[in-house]
Image (cartoon, rainbow, N blue to C red):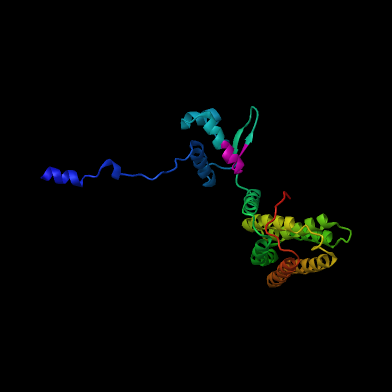
């Protein structure tokens, strides 16, 4: 009787089930390990990684796996690969350019609407102007003035005007000296540039209003008046977004390499 009871309580093989799970690729595991050491500072910038044959020996992975892991890190701008006798894979720190590329891919890949980009700029750029007023240098002001001159040029064509406008907005972020905001605002400004290449919208009146607003914001930044810089930027980006919404509503945009 006891044996029969035990047999009845013992689960059969069919009662034991496992859910499917993914086993990471060996190259992803190696890339992740090296990435963590780079980001933690254990592997400092400029230091060469072990030679490919040494990585193969140390990790017991195939040469193809090691190469793929290094390619992953190269795409992520965490190593730079030099060819030749003195070549190899050298550690490098992530750059603002890396962030710009990642945000730009997100905007393009998700087909973010232009109106959403403008809303994001309304949320962030007044604070960028405030930071610029606090932290700007004389060199930063020189760049903003150069962009303002190009914006005010009556002979500038649409592309030249938009490029100068892009330079000014990025310049405000740069003047704030916050790396995260610089990277994000650069990608955002490039996307808006690509989405507003429209003669019907960027007419003479828009150019004049833009130039006037930029000059006023630059003056506040120059005078280190953070409150005025933020207030004027908020008014500027809000009116620009409102005018754009009235002019044209796009479903999505393309971000060009600018």
- Who's the residue at 49% across and 41% down the image? 33
Q: Nearer the viewer, residue 179 or 11?
A: 11
Horizontal and vertical percent position of residue 145: 80, 61
Q: Nearer the viewer, residue 108 or 122?
A: 108
Residue 47 visible in image: no
| On screen, residue 7 above or below 174 | above
Task: Report which quarter residue 252 is drawn in.
Answer: bottom right
Q: Residue furthest right?
A: 155
| On screen, residue 12 above or below 142 | above
Q: Nearer the viewer, residue 40 or 16?
A: 16
What is the span of residues highlighted in magenta in the rendered image? 70-80
Is residue 74 magenta-colored?
Answer: yes
Residue 181 visible in image: yes
Horizontal and vertical percent position of residue 30: 50, 38
Q: Count all numbered tags in the image, as a single digit.
A: 0
Horizontal and vertical percent position of residue 124: 64, 64
Horizontal and vertical percent position of residue 186: 69, 55
| On screen, residue 132 above or below 78 | below
Task: Report which quarter residue 209 is drawn in.
Answer: bottom right
Q: Nearer the viewer, residue 155 or 253?
A: 253
The image quadrant where one finds the N terminus is top left
In the figure, is residue 171 to the left or right of 70?
right
- Who's the residue at 66% across and 56% down the image? 182
Task: Report which quarter residue 80 is drawn in.
Answer: top right
Is residue 247 magenta-colored?
Answer: no
- Who's the residue at 69% across and 58% down the image? 174
In the figure, is residue 143 to the left or right of 83?
right
């Amino acid at each position: 009787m006891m044996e029969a009871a035990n047999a009845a309580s013992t689960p059969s093989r069919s009662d034991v089930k496992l859910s499917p799970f993914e086993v990471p690729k060996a190259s992803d595991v190696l890339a992740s390990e090296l990435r963590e050491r780079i980001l933690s500072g254990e592997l400092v910038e400029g230091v060469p990684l072990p030679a490919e044959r040494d990585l193969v020996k140390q990790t017991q992975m195939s040469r193809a796996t090691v190469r793929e892991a290094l390619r992953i890190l190269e795409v992520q701008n965490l190593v730079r690969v030099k060819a030749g006798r003195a070549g190899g894979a050298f550690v490098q720190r992530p750059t603002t350019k890396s962030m710009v590329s990642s945000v730009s891919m997100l905007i393009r890949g998700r087909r973010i609407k232009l109106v959403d980009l403008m809303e994001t700029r309304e949320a962030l750029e007044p604070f960028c102007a405030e930071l610029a007023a606090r932290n700007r240098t004389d060199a930063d002001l020189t760049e903003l003035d150069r962009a303002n001159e190009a914006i005010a040029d009556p002979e500038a064509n649409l592309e030249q005007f938009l490029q100068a406008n892009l330079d000014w907005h990025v310049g405000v972020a740069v003047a704030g000296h916050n790396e995260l905001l610089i990277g994000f605002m650069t990608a955002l400004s490039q996307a808006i540039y690509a989405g507003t290449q429209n003669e019907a919208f960027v007419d003479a009146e828009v150019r004049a209003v833009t130039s006037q607003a930029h000059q006023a914001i630059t003056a506040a930044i120059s005078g280190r008046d953070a409150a005025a810089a933020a207030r004027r930027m908020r008014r500027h980006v809000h009116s620009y977004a409102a005018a754009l919404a009235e002019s044209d509503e796009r479903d999505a945009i393309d971000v060009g390499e600018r």
